Image: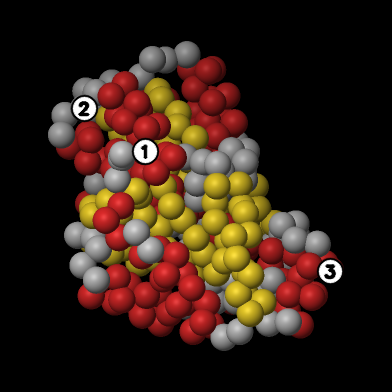
Amino acid sequence: MAIRIITDSTADLPQELKSRYNILTIPLYVHFGEEVYLDGIDLTPTSFLAKLQSSPVFPKTSQPTPEDFRRIFQGILEQEDEALFIGISSELSGTISSALLAANELNSEQISIIDSRNVTLGLGLLVLHACDLIEKGSSLREVTEGIKKLIPLVKISFVVDTLDFLYKGGRLSRTQALIGNILNIRPRIEIIDGKLVVAEKIRGTKAKAQSHLLSWATQDQSSIDQRWIGVPHCYDLKEAEIIAEHLRQMKLADEIVTSQAGAIISSHCGPGAFCIVYLRKPE
């Protein structure tokens, strides 16, 4: 009996890692008016950007349905395997609720659901740690308990290039976005207990914002878990590679994972956003 790891498309894991660990991904939905797309399947990052630039309507997003989850869980159970789903923070999406409804309907002890309280590679790194635990022979219960202990250790912060997307996605008021753009403010946002929190308001250039983000991530280097550090971005590979190279030179992790965010994250952060994610060592 094998444990199958499932996550959702907001984890933003590169395909190479999903293939390496045989990770299943359930997509969230992206709506452009009446048109509905599956994130990462019939709407890739490239096609999403083109659609974003040409569409007269702003995209909206929605979670997978309980039926979407039921089909995946049912297929795993029919193979006599176990299912572990780790998903986007329940404070940011109804995805976990859909998964729980499907799991309750199937009423099987072979299904485990974990609310990551996170998003993008904050979620993705937890998925990778779960894969490591499985490779070491841990049971479904042991993996579930182990990942739940890691959730408070995830540290994630990102900087956006424009406040327009946070406003249009309902995360900022119009006045906040307007004043912030006029003053050239690039907020540094952290995810704390599953919610978005503005931790710092950086006024100035992208280079200054990058410097602040790196200072935040490296202020206590001895506390950083050295297995992985994530550097997701929204259509700013150049910035992500600069940040990743800084981190590599500091030898802070065995593997620096860079990734292009999918349509869900990009809908809320907008092009030009960049991020650093790591786990703190347990005390």
CA distance for labels 3 and 1: 37 Å
- For the N terminus, give its image quadrant: top left
Location of residue 187 in the rendering, given as x and y in whole percent from the top left corner: 62, 69
Q: Is residue 17 visible?
A: no
| Residue that label 1 marks | 150
Q: N-terminal of the two: label 2 or label 1?
A: 2
SS for dot 2: loop
The quadrant holding residue 59 is bottom right
SS for dot 3: helix
| Residue that label 2 marks | 138
Q: Residue at x 60, y 65 (%)?
A: 200
Q: Answer few, some or many: residues within 10 Å of disc 2's Cα (few below 14, many 20 plus, some between 14 and 19).
A: some
Give above or below for 111 relative to 19: above
Badge nearest the viewer, 2 or 1:
1
Q: Is residue 204 left or right of residue 45?
A: right
| Residue that label 3 marks | 175
Q: N-terminal of the two: label 2 or label 3?
A: 2
Q: Answer few, some or many: residues within 10 Å of disc 1's Cα (few below 14, many 20 plus, some between 14 and 19).
A: some
Location of residue 246 in the rendering, given as x and y in whole percent from the top left corner: 31, 76
Q: N-terminal of the two: label 3 or label 1?
A: 1
Q: Is residue 131 visible?
A: yes
